[in-house]
Image: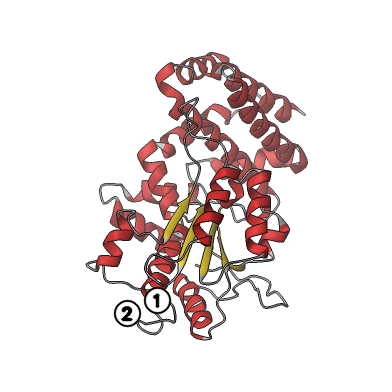
Amino acid sequence: MVDQAEQATGPIATATLTGHDAAELAFLETAAAQRMPHAWLLSGPRGIGKMTLAYRIARYQLSQGMVGGNLFGGPGSLQIPAESDLFGRILAGGHGDLRVIERTENPKTKKLRGEIVVEQIRALGQFFSMTAAEGGWRIAIIDGAEEMNPNAANALLKLLEEPPAHCLLLLVSHAPGRLLPTIRSRCRHLALRPLEEADAIAVLARQLPDLEQDECLGLVRLAEGSPGRAMAMAVEGGLQTYGELIAMVRDLPNLDYAAVHTLGDRLARANNEAAYRVWVDLLRLWLSRLARGGAGLDQMRDAVTGEVALASRLTMAVGLDRWVELWEKIGGLAMRAERVNLDRKQVVLSAFTALQSTARN
């Protein structure tokens, strides 16, 4: 699932191979040539296996020792036996030479932070400065690297400028454009892309065999080829919620404000924060699909019945720039609402008012 991308001119390049296996091959060939970059950037949409690949790389490299002992995995494979002690310790989070950095809970608010903070990256520097516990490599995975705040990003940049020997950084990013260019330029880049529709449907059907065929198709299209994202949407009732959203905006600029208020009341309940977040994400996803389809960037296909016809009508009536502007506006509204704890119903009402205003124009 590695996307075809522009190849860099220097020693750090973006992979131009296709297929998930090709990403592994790119890593293995680099390792075999004894020119291992100290940092790799694994990018692509959510749910397509970037963390899975990061863990496969970490397990393989930790199995190789200081000079590449080839304990596990043969040529062309990062596979480590699941019954091995190494695999078990990494799975349990008990390997002394592997660290995973991700957003953590704020001890004051007891809520998940919105960013990776500088203290986490500084601790990573201390981890890399120590001798490997098992005499080989020290490896760190940063999950959601674009979520580092500016101080954390600058701390990571310093680490990349003076990388310790036998240390490997794996940056997993859903939005690599948000990383500092100087960070991206110091990484070997593997840009992963979603599966083809038929392949993604096959994966989803294996994981969730009780889903109807039309549900699988709708979820895969909504998740844009990402099986992991499709599974998360299935668990959250995302396809049903998306269908309800399309039904509510089908007659834009006309709106059923009684239905809008009912939705706002439901999402504002204390126990419905997760449903509210799903709704906001799906609203922005719809606007993104509408704009990209209207611009000809994607061949839009119905995730729910009537979606393409609605998008065609709206993009013909109103310029694409207005829909992109609305996508940005609603994203900003949702972020501000979270920061200052705005009433969720007010966010819903404001979003629909903005939708109606845009459609009228």
Tell me the kind of residue under disc 2.
Leu
Label 2 crowd (10 A; few <14 / some 14-19 / many >=20): few
Q: Which residue is mark 1?
A: 65
Depth check: give the residue in front, 193 or 300: 193
Distance of label 1 from label 2 (alpha carbons): 8 Å
- In the picture, measured across the screen, residue 19 lies left or right of residue 290, that is left
* Residue 178 seen by the camera: no
Identify the residue at horizontal 42%, vertical 42% (top origin).
233
Q: Nearer the viewer, residue 121 or 259?
A: 121
Vertical position of residue 42 compared to residue 286: above or below: below
* Residue 45 screen position, x and y as percent: 54, 54
- The residue depicted at 44 percent of the width and 29 percent of the height is 274
| Residue 329 located left or right of residue 31 | right
| Image quarter of the C terminus | top right
Q: Earlier in the sequence, mark 1 or mark 2?
A: 1
Are the two marked residues, 1 and 2, in contact with CB atoms closer than 8 angstroms?
A: yes
Q: Does 100 appear above or below 351?
A: below
Q: Secondary structure at mark 2?
A: loop
Q: What's the amino acid at mark 1?
A: Gly
Q: How many marks?
A: 2
Q: Is residue 93 above or below residue 6?
A: above
Q: Does the rendering let one see residue 188?
A: yes
Residue at far left of view = 83
Q: Would residue 268 appear left or right of 358 to someone viewing this image?
A: left
Q: Position of residue 87 (x, y in %)?
A: 29, 64
The residue located at (71%, 40%) in the rendering is 324
Q: Identify the secondary structure beneath mark 1.
A: loop
Residue 308 image point, x, y percent: 57, 45
- In the rendering, which numbered label is found on residue 352? none
Judging by the rendered image, the residue that carries numbered circle 2 is: 71
Place of residue 13 in the rendered image (x, y in percent of width and height, measured from the top left): 65, 73
